Amino acid sequence: MQPILSVHNLNKYYGNQVGCKNMNLTLYPGEVVGVVGESGSGKTTFINSISGNLIPDSGKILIETGNETIDFLEISESLKRLLIRTELAFVHQNPRDGLRLDVSAGGNISERLMSIGQRNYGNIRQTIFKWLDKVEIDKSRVDDFPRTFSGGMLQRLQIAKNLVTSPKIIFMDEPTGGLDVSVQAKILDLLRKLVRELNLSVVIVSHDLAVIRLLADKIIVMKNGEAVESGLCDQVLDDPQHSYTQLLVSSVLQV
Amino acid sequence: MIELNKITKKFTLHNQGKTNILVFNNLNLKINPGEIVALTGPSGVGKSSILKMIYGNYVFQSGQIKINNHNIDHIYPRNIIELRKNIIGYVSQFLRVIPRVPTIEIVMEPLLEINSDKDEVREKAEKILLKLNIDKNLWNLSPLTFSGGEQQRVNVARGLIRNYPCLLLDEPTASLDSVNKDIVLNLINEKKDSGSSIIGIFHDEYSRKYLNAREIDITKISDAK
């Protein structure tokens, strides 16, 4: 099997300041890779740099579409935009960053569909209902504005909006970050189901090791912009080799 | 078939004065298909560590672990993920699940990895839950509020719903009453008879005898202790 996404020696600096340095990642279809580390360790810079939100200074990003291998940093801006609307998706920590608040819930979901050329109102409406159902938002809310939604609903709407075009690679930056724990459990369950049903490949950033343990197959531990340890998620959390990972794992509060 | 050849395992605690703890030195072990091996030895001797090395949770410093001729190699996490999907099953001591997910779905999950027919999988999950005396009224509830024994049986159901060629069992009967213990032991025997290589930790003599397990005292197969 070929990796669907591979990142080689990626570097991103802010002036002299290291954003992330020498980062590598291999993501296979159906796999979830978690990126952990304390705040300021470069997690968000890394995920933004590999998803098209930031332009890295150097490195290589290869995306396998099934027909061809795309060199993500070398392609034209228009092709990149198309990829970001179709094959890739980005779920922000704050759903308000990923949604249009002055457009109805249904309108938010249909945006990506229309951007890839779907015009049939009936079909689009049907797809919207299918996705509202998948993320457990009541159909009757389809024409309501997101600003009338709760935080957890907004996050689920953002997930629906992103997944509606069946992207192959999903990037998530702290998708359960601002949510209370009961809502967080629901989102985690939803994400896990979607990953399995749709064979999604996911890169997820979180500072919460418990979230990563439940979702991720592999893990990258970052510190000061660099990966200090990576590998099988269970192994890195159960038998961490690097002193920083040992510190991180042993600092988690037991409930 | 599970094979451990010349395994060395140590823990280095970087933040606690770089303490080195040697757990195994020159550990050798082989579990054949259709065989149950029961690990014995005092607490802290490394019984769970052996299971965790086989499942890939623990790294080892030298030697080789082979599962049906596939190497456990942490350089290639992908291979371990594939092995877990297809070959190795693991019943851990404690249930680790997402809160609020119904019991039935937790039990169905491992089978859904290889069978996308939800109705068929649900039927199998219901069957094994019935067998393990989990009350029907509980199936749609999260097991996190269940009693210890119930949680353990949910964990067993999840681990035994599939037929893995290799099976790792960490105290699968520890908190069960005698009736349910026998039910679980019978299920394990069925797996053995179907040709699985099984290695486990069973706290009581009764379970080990019931399973006709080959007992291995870890202190006698590793030079470290």
Image: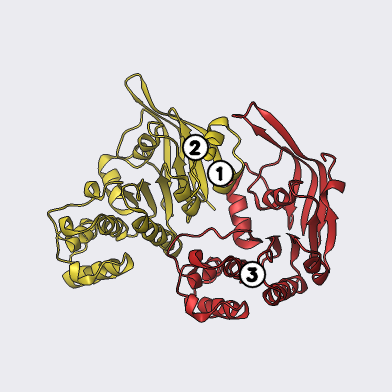
Chain colours: A yellow, B red
For mark 3, does the 10 Å Cα neighbourhood hold few (<14), some (14 to 19), or many (20 or more) residues?
many
- Which residue is outermost to the top? A16
Of A78 and B124, which appears nearest the observer? Answer: B124
> Image point 32% across, 58% down: which residue?
A163
Whole-percent x and y of residue B94? 59, 58
Q: Which numbered circle lies on residue B160?
A: 3
Mark drawn on residue B89? none
Is the C-beta separation of discs 3 and 1 under 8 Å? Answer: no
Q: Earlier in the sequence, mark 2 or mark 1?
A: 2
Secondary structure beneath label 3: helix
- The answer to whether residue A68 shows anywhere in this view is no
**Vertical order, A227 against A182 (above or below):** above
Instruction: Give the letter of the chain under mark 2.
Output: A
Identify the residue at image location x=81%, y=62%.
Answer: B32
The picture places residue B37, in percent across and down from the top left corner, at 80, 61
Q: Are marks 2 and 3 in contact (CB under 8 Å)?
A: no
- Place of residue B106 in the rendered image (x, y in percent of width and height, measured from the top left): 51, 67
Is residue B38 at all visible to an observer of this figure?
Answer: yes
Q: Position of residue B196 (x, y in %)?
A: 74, 67
Q: Which residue is mark 1?
A: A237
What's the residue type where badge 2 is placed? Val
Q: For the residues marked 3 and 1, what is the alpha-carbon distance in whole angstroms?
A: 25 Å
**Of A123 and B46, the residue lying toward us:** B46
Mark 2 highlights which residue? A221
